[in-house]
Structure formats: C-alpha cells, structure tokens
Image (tube, grey):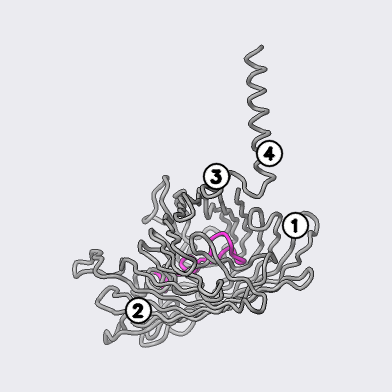
Amino acid sequence: MNMKVSLWKVLSIAVALLLSCAVTSDAFKVQVDEDTWADFAVRGQLSYKNFDKRSEAIDYRKNYFELTEAEFYVKGQINDLIQFFTQWECVYKPLKLDGTDRSSGYKKDGVVMKETGMNFLFAPEFKVRFGRIRIPVSRYHQRSDYGKIIQTDYFYRYDIQEVFTGKDLGLKVNKTALNIREPGVVFYGDPFDGMLRYHLGLFNQPNNEDTDKKYNYKGLRYTARLAFTPTMLGFKPESSLKGTRKDSYLGKKDILTIGAGYSKEEIWKDLNNEMYAVDAFFEKKFGSIVPNLGCGYIKAKKTHRELIDGRSQDSAFWFVQGQLLYDEVVGFGKPAIAAKFERMESDKAYANKDVKSDRLSVALNYYFEGYSAWISLGLDNVKYKDGAKDYLVANNKEDSFTDYTLSLQFIF
C-alpha cells in the first residue's frame, strides 16, 4: 500500500512538473546561469494526402497518411562567446509522391543528424558558424522547416514526376541549386545595429564527381549574402541562432528584408555552376490584420548539359508567396489564408526544349498556439510545360494534377 502511495506521489509530482513546463514560454529550458543555458524541443509534422492521378502505368494510392517530420532539437549557449545547436530527425520510409514506393535512400528505421553547428560570437559585427549548416545564398536556402506558411513547401518532393530531380534528364536541381545544407563555415555579422547582415561561406562540393561516378570533394563552394533592413523606419532585423528565417512572424514584429546572394561550385561533368539570388520579405501588423509578402529569384548557371550536343545550360527558380493573418482568437485559434506560386525551369533539357513546371499552392491555416500547434488544409496544383510536358506524354505520365493535404504541426 505504501508503495502504491509513493508511486502516485511520484506520478503527481511528474505531472505537476510537466504542466509547469507547458505553461511557460521556455518549455524544457535548462538555465545554468545568465550566460549558460540549453533549450530542448520535440517537433513533428503529420499529414493526410489525397493524391490526384499520376499515370496510367502506376497503381498509386489515392489516400495516404504520412509522418512528414519527427525530430529532436536542442540549441543553447556555453557562455557569452559560444553557442551550439543540433537537430536529429527520425528516419522513415515514405511513399514517393508519384505514387510509387521509395526503395532506396531511406533506412527502415533509425535517426539521422540533420544539422549541427557552433557559433562563435566574437562581436556583433563578426561571428563564425561552423558545422553542417544552412547555405546562405537566398531566403529559400535559409527558410525554417517549422516556420512555413505552406506546409507542403518541399520542391524536391513536389517535383512529383521527378523531371527535375530524377536521373532521366540529368538535372538534379535539388542537389545543386536548391540544396540547403552542407558541412562548412560561415563568417557573418550585423553591422549598424542590424541594418545590414552579411554572410561569407565556404562549403563542401558534394556534387563534384570523378570519371567513375564516385563523389570527390575537390575544392570548396564559395557563397556570399547581404541583407538590408531599414531599421530607421521601425522594422526589425531577422536573426536566429542557427541562421534560419520564417515565412511569417505571426504579428510579433514588423519585418522588411531585402537580400542578394552569390554562390560558385564545381559540379559533376566539370560544370562550373554559379548562382545569383535576389529576394524580399515584408510583414507588418495593422490592428488585428497581419499581411505578409515574400518573393525570390535564383539564377543557376551551368546546372546541366544539353542532351543533343552536350553544351552547358542554365536553370532558374522563382517564387512569390504571402499570408493574411487575423491576429485574434476565433474559436480556439487564429485563422489565416496563405498562397504561393513557384516556377522551376531548365534550358533545353529535353528535345532541345526548355523544361518548366509551375506550382500553385493555397492553404487555410489555423494557429492554436503559433507554430507550436497549428493545422493547415491546402491544395497543390502542379503543371509541367514545354519540354517537361513532352517528356511526360512520351512516358505516359500525367502533366497536370492537384493534391489536397491536411497537415498538423507541433513543437514542444
């Protein structure tokens, strides 16, 4: 009997501790002293998808439940000079969005390291980030996985027919132009009280292959980015411990950021790829209404070779997106509507024609507790055009389809 009473006491104390953590803004935060702390988080994204028809040849699943993300994240500070972060994701075996099973590239179970790094804060104007980190070229590369307004915002997955990410056309833009993480080092700073933010980076070149098709990390990839915020007009500069940027700050601060970036990398078949990027982001609260608008353009030179004569060709990616949030509780949370349009194109990638895809996404978002608990109902319409359409027709695949997705996200 005493054992049972003791057990109930322990459980009661544990529940009380959990509840006390849950109602604070710093759940699972360990504070050693003013300069030493660690913040722990468990994060996940789940979804139900209703797939449109992909192909006559593929027996696809029309309805599909999916665990999109599940991870453990820690960030902290050793002292006022050194910060750290690490992000680990559970590995699972999802269905490809073309309706087929993903047979390679995924373990059946286990955990993989997504990002890990250290920051050395020598001065506000000069800092160093080292590790497997974000490549600071454009806002797209810096986007937060858990701060998106369109939950399905993964280009590498929503190139559903794998025109740009598959082996047939040799484009692989997800591994070159839109690859967002690599081991490397970034020198960065915030001069003029955050009005300017610069990034200078050196990264591995994993897309450099030798003649035997084996990866050969020759040389380094050079990157640079400069961002401007008119702080004199009351706008706040963006910052995060690991260098990510959100699609929306949900009315917590007014933001206006204009950025430009550059990258140079030697990729497979001796192509010297250069990227140029420009982007802008605006968000401002007007009473109970919080609109935001973001856009970006990436020009990637020499990403692939023309199939007919082997000459090098370029690719480009651009997007425009926005959200309108009603910053008042309606029922249990705050409603919003978001939309995004993006285009990917690669020059003369099939039958001497440009290969293009357009994607339009619309979502109804409902924030129970900001990004910590929210639900989204959205649709994604994808259309392949020009050479991409010809390629799909030749392979008896659909060149246009619309998917519906119910997404949920939690952070604790």
Q: Is residue 389 visible?
A: no
Residue, disc 4: 19
Whether residue 159 appears in magenta in the rendering, the answer is yes
Q: Find residue 304 and report its horizontal and vertical position in percent.
A: 33, 79
Check disc 2 and give the amino acid type: Thr
On residue 33, the disc is 3
Spatial CA span between label 4 and label 1: 20 Å
Q: Earlier in the sequence, mark 4 or mark 3?
A: 4
The mark closer to the camera, 2 or 3, is: 3
Residue, disc 1: 333
Residue, disc 2: 303
User: For this rendering, which residue is in front, 38 or 309?
Assistant: 38
What secondary structure is marked by label 1?
loop
- The reply to whether discs 3 and 1 touch (Cβ–Cβ < 8 Å) is no
Q: Find residue 306 and report its horizontal and vertical position in percent.
A: 31, 84
Check disc 1 and give the amino acid type: Gly
Q: Is residue 63 visible?
A: yes
User: For this rendering, which residue is in front, 99 or 288?
Assistant: 288
Q: Residue furthest top?
A: 1
Q: Which residues are magenta?
A: 144-165
Q: Quadrant of residue 63?
A: bottom right
- The reply to whether discs 4 and 1 touch (Cβ–Cβ < 8 Å) is no
